[in-house]
């Protein structure tokens, strides 16, 4: 069997192939052919009875490997162990791409191939399932074309670090302008162990302050911004691995509603320390002498000091809440601020309204307050509160504020 071909330099060459059964082989020299050249060949076979078979064809020479760009992740990218990692690359060729894969070498030296899938256009991509192995991963992109050319020159790397878990508390979450607030909490590894760092960075309105971590716990007191609005309180750990872990709590800064009560005296309703819920109390309204308040050790409830002449006890059936409040506000100079100062056991939660001048402590039966408030709201505020009445639920802070606003205007 003979094989005749053009060598791309104007010379035709014929070689005799060596056959072993049905397989015939030989060497042809195409060193004069360059990228894109096309030449011809003729394969002539004769059988033992004089028959001849001829096969003609063309050869186009292509030796340029695929072009690989836009590899991700970018070198040095850091991920936590729970983050999704996509390995991507763009691969193009003047013929056709046959396959693209990523050879990934683990921190322990093991290398695995990850076949990338054609996503859109020339982009190949595949999700890498993050193993529970921290450290640096090295990636080599391997692209093959249909002519057998290979590009394996594009590399990248990334790092996997542990997850950090934040538990944050902000007290209060709704503060008056300039008032103090406390951000506190814990930062732990995902398995509950302590993190290696010993501090957190807390950012309020662009100002960053460090707080010490002790056994993964921190607490930091700061002043709320002077302007009303909503603010992100950022808590960040600059980890030794180079990764920045961040969590946040939202602080609302607002002013209390203000206006005039009976007799034209100014008053304000302060919701700084209220927690959402229904507050229950025992009985009556107590008007105590002008004395500073004190705090009991066991309950944390602020009460007026015990006096021999404690003032007037108003029984529940004698006055409605709105009558009591109107009476207090009718006294010149009185101003109301409200705060939930303690929570008792069982179904009892103590809420007290403290006068700014220290003149009285108000306390009502929750049922009595609720019934009178719903009755008043139904008549004065409108149908918005009817559903609350039917469900027999207490007012939210916002509804209490609207109630007192309507009471004031009435």
Image (cartoon, helix red, strand yellow):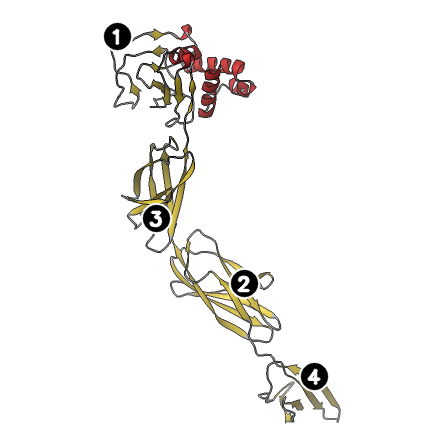
Q: Quadrant of residue 282?
A: top left
Above/below status of 376 relative to 143: above
- Earlier-in-chain disc, 3 versus 4: 4
Residue nearest the viewer, comparing 328 with 278: 328
- Nearer mark to the viewer, of 1 and 4: 1
Q: Secondary structure at mark 3?
A: strand
- Pointer 1 local density, CA inside 10 Å: few below 14, some 14–19, many at least 20: few
- Earlier-in-chain disc, 1 versus 2: 2
Q: Which residue is mark 1?
A: 309
Residue 57 is tagged as 4
Q: Secondary structure at mark 4?
A: strand
Residue nearest the viewer, comparing 177 with 172: 177
Q: Which residue is mark 2?
A: 116
Q: Residue at x 65, y 89 (%)?
A: 6
In the rendered structure, the answer to whether residue 403 lies left or right of residue 32 reads left
Residue 254 picture location, percent across and down: 41, 30
Determine the CA span between mark 3 and mark 2: 35 Å
Q: Secondary structure at mark 2?
A: loop
- Nearer mark to the viewer, of 3 and 2: 3
């Amino acid at each position: 069997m003979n094989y005749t071909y053009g060598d791309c330099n104007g010379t035709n060459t014929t070689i005799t192939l060596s056959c072993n059964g049905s397989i015939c082989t030989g060497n042809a020299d195409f060193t004069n052919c360059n990228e894109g050249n096309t030449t011809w060949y003729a394969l002539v076979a004769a059988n033992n009875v004089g028959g001849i078979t001829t096969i003609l064809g063309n050869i186009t020479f292509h030796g340029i490997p695929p072009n690989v760009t836009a590899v991700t992740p970018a070198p040095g990218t850091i991920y936590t162990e729970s983050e999704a990692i996509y390995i991507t690359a763009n691969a193009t060729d003047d013929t056709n791409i046959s396959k693209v894969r990523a050879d990934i070498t683990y921190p322990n030296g093991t290398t695995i191939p990850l076949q990338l899938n054609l996503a859109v256009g020339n982009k190949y991509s595949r999700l890498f399932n993050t193993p529970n192995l921290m450290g640096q991963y090295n990636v080599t992109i391997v692209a093959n074309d249909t002519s057998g050319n290979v590009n394996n020159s594009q590399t990248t790397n990334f790092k996997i670090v542990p997850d950090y878990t934040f538990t944050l508390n902000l007290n209060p979450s709704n503060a008056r302008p300039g008032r103090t607030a406390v951000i506190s909490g814990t930062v732990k590894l995902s398995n509950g162990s302590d993190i290696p760092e010993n501090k957190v960075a807390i950012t309020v309105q662009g100002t960053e302050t460090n707080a010490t971590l002790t056994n993964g716990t921190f607490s930091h007191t700061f002043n709320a911004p002077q302007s009303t609005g909503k603010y992100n309180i950022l808590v960040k750990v600059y980890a030794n691995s180079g990764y920045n872990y961040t969590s946040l709590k939202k602080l609302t800064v607002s002013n209390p509603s203000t206006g005039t009560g009976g007799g034209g005296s100014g008053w304000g309703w302060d919701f700084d320390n209220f927690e959402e819920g229904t507050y229950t109390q025992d009985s009556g309204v107590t008007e105590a002498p002008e004395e500073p308040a004190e705090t009991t050790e066991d309950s944390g409830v602020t009460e007026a000091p015990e006096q021999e002449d404690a003032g007037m006890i108003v029984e529940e059936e004698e006055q409605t809440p709105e009558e009591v409040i109107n009476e207090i506000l009718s006294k010149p100079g009185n101003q109301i601020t409200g705060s939930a100062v303690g929570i008792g056991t069982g179904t009892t939660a103590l809420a007290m309204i403290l006068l700014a001048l220290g003149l009285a402590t108000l306390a009502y039966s929750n049922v009595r307050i609720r019934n009178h408030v719903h009755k008043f709201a139904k008549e004065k505020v409108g149908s918005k509160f009817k559903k609350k009445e039917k469900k027999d639920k207490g007012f939210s802070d916002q509804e209490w504020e609207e109630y007192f606003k309507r009471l004031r205007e009435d």
